[in-house]
Image: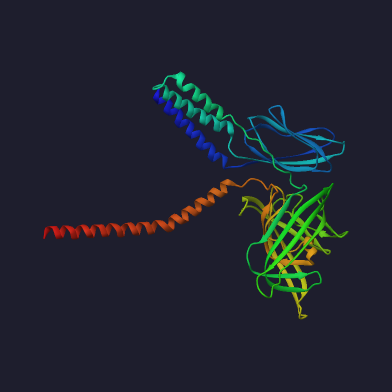
Amino acid sequence: MKSISIILIVFGIGIIVAEIFRGYVSDTASGEGLIEGQPIRILEGIWSPRKVYLNIKVYGGSVDILFYSNGIVLKRWNNTTGFIDRIDILRRGRSYILIMPRTNKTCRVSVRTTFYGVEKDILTHGFIFIILGTMIYMISFVKLRRFLPYTLFLLLLFNINIFYATPNWFKQGIYARYASKIIDDVSILFKNNTVINGKWKVYVYLKCSDIDGDMAKLFVNITLIGLNNFSPTFSRADYVLLNLSSRRIFYKGKNIGITCIFLEDIPKEGEKIALIEIDDYKVNGTVKRIKIIPMNNFGYQNAIAVKFNITMNGVYANGSETTLSVVGLTDYDTDTGIILDGLWVSDPLFLIADIKMMIVDLNLIETNIDIGPSDIATEIQSWLARILVISIIITPIILVSYIIYKRKISAKRKIKNNTYLK
């Protein structure tokens, strides 16, 4: 009986360890469909009890979306044109996303799901094996009627599930704060074509104060903190209107261009896209690759790197002409399409501060937008690489110290022995 209990305990520990490692790997599934007046099901199948990050986009209209799990409507979204949300699947079973049109108008729906975290039922089974093994082992020493109440109590503890949801992608109240990553010379081209150089720490803050249909009202604050006597600190703040379907910015009733703060569609590798438009100057971008980037406050995020080339002419205060030219990369989140990191050098949003171009490297430092779970596997690999480097550095030092220590001990013993012989 003791052998059986040990086997059960070891088996349970093995399941738990394997499932914990499994939880570090996220799985992605996606699907698309055309709705022509009839409901459709997307991603139907057996879903494991893990956390799910949903990213759904609707083109050409609005729909009702229901998430079914084990025959129960786990969540419903009415009259939506797309959203980002998280769901915690409680039990393994058949699940699917039901999309119901509100009109006979043809719509296209894109669904992307990311499964992450441990599979709760398998993890629970691991604990049950450990408890059963422990119970069988204890039976050899304690009567069953004394041990059973404690066992049942432990089993109940592992039948607890947690449910939570997070906000949708673009809605009233979302905000994002960006800051320049390094303190370096910044070149600024103003709307009147004047160019100045200096050292600034740059901050850009955006907040959605209201949404009406496809139009969002954004509060924009641009602050440059001067780092020497030749770089004055200044800050500008104002409201703009953003068309969510075209990314066009309207300021004081005038169309001033297309922002690159986010991409409405996540492009594929090698695809060319319209990135920026400012004062009739257009900048196109090319998706170079999909990669994983480290974010200080958001772990490791999947991103697409968009390469662009921008050139503008200006004049210094002394009248000499100059050209500002940048070939750079900007990283966009693959779940929301929002800028995460990179050279954000020109945007109609900057025009509230009369800035047409600003050569600075900005990254996202704070937001309440759900940009998706961190890529834990990459994070672990990064930590293992750091540990390996540290080990390579420290091991020779420890080894040399040990050899010196052993030699000193050996020398002391020889002196002691020679003294004793004399």
Percent x, y for residue 417? 16, 57
**Which residue does the image show at 48% across and 25% down from the upper left?**
132
Percent x, y for residue 408? 26, 60
Total count of labels: 0
Q: Farthest residue in the left direction?
A: 422
The structure's colour scheme is: rainbow
- Among the 4 quarters of the image, the one containing residue 47: top right
**Which residue does the image show at 80% across and 32% down from the upper left?**
39
Percent x, y for residue 61? 84, 42
Query: In the rendered view of the protein, which quadrant contains the N terminus?
Result: top left
Position above or below: 66 against 82: above
Depth check: give the residue in front, 256 or 40.
256
Residue 379 left/right relative to 233? left
Residue 128 left/right relative to 364? left
Depth check: give the residue in front, 58 or 77.
77
Percent x, y for residue 28? 65, 41
- Among the 4 quarters of the image, the one containing residue 281: bottom right
Q: Is residue 293 visible?
A: no
Query: In the rendered view of the protein, which quadrant contains the C terminus?
Result: bottom left
Position above or below: 197 against 34: below
Position above or below: 388 against 161: below
Q: Is residue 96 visible?
A: yes
**Which residue does the image show at 71% across and 28% down from the upper left?**
72
